Amino acid sequence: MKEFFLLLKLGWENKAYRRKLDRIEKERLGGFGWYRSLKRAVEKVYRYQNPYLLARSARRKIKLPEADLIFGETPYLTAFDLLTELGVDQADHVVECGGGTSTFSLVATTAFGANATVLEIVPGFVKKTRAVASLLGLERVQVKQTDILEEPLPEGTVYYLTGTTFSKESWQKLQRQMAQAPEGSRAISLSVALDSKAWRLDQTLTLPFSWGENTVYLQTRK
């Protein structure tokens, strides 16, 4: 019973935290047409299926360590601030390793005009991101259903990955994949920095995500 009330308390705290994030986000981004259009498209596509439930159902169907299918969202504002910090523009190709709802790539294409490739193993997320892109008429984003631990990563100028959502073994595999990234490319890694032998640490930030504040590492391929 004590555990039940603790979980209930945490749930209410997270709801209050997310309401605060939403308010700040609307204050800063509400004046942008790309933001309003993207938000409407995502809400329409996910109207009858919550992304958290979609991720949970995928755990029963996809043979991966449970840690690899933990779901968390990158807020539009956090993606916008990260992309602004890196100075991303139309010349960039963003590669999102494990897209989920693919917020980072969708903001990169709609707000910054970049090209993007989303790599996602869950069919439901692949289908829905493609639906969002279709509603917005986005031709600059490609969504591929693939296992990023088994397939070579495409060449990009910016990589986005979340160390929070990988088991230790899977993260080591992904590190080996990332070591093949082009020289001079940049990476944004959540929670865990990439191998310092291959990547130079440029900056460390603390930014809000759906689960709370998180450390973000901005790195460049040596």
Image (cartoon, grey):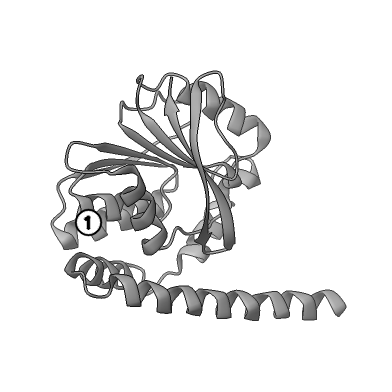
Whether residue 204 can be seen here: yes
Q: Determine the residue positioned at 36% across, 62% down.
A: 76
Which part of the image, by quadrant, shows the C terminus?
top left
The answer to whether residue 188 is left or right of residue 171 is left
In this rendering, the answer to whether 4 lies above or below 115 is below
Q: Who is closer to the viewer here, 142 or 180?
A: 180
Which part of the image, by quadrant, shows the N terminus?
bottom right
- Residue type at numbered disc 1: Ala
Q: Who is closer to the viewer here, 181 or 203?
A: 203
Whether residue 102 can be seen here: no
Q: Determine the residue positioned at 38% across, 32% down.
A: 186
Q: Position of residue 110 (x, y in %)?
A: 21, 56
In this rendering, the answer to whether 99 lies above or below 80 is above
Location of residue 168 by image quarter: top right
- Count the labels in the image: 1
The answer to whether residue 109 is left or right of residue 54 is left
Q: Position of residue 88 (x, y in %)?
A: 27, 43
Q: Could you say whether the residue bearing mark 1 is in a helix, strand or loop?
A: helix
Residue neighbourhood size for the residue with mark 1, other residues' Cα within 10 Å, grouped as few (<14), some (14–19), many (≥20): some
The answer to whether residue 117 is left or right of residue 79 is left
Residue that numbered label 1 is attached to: 111
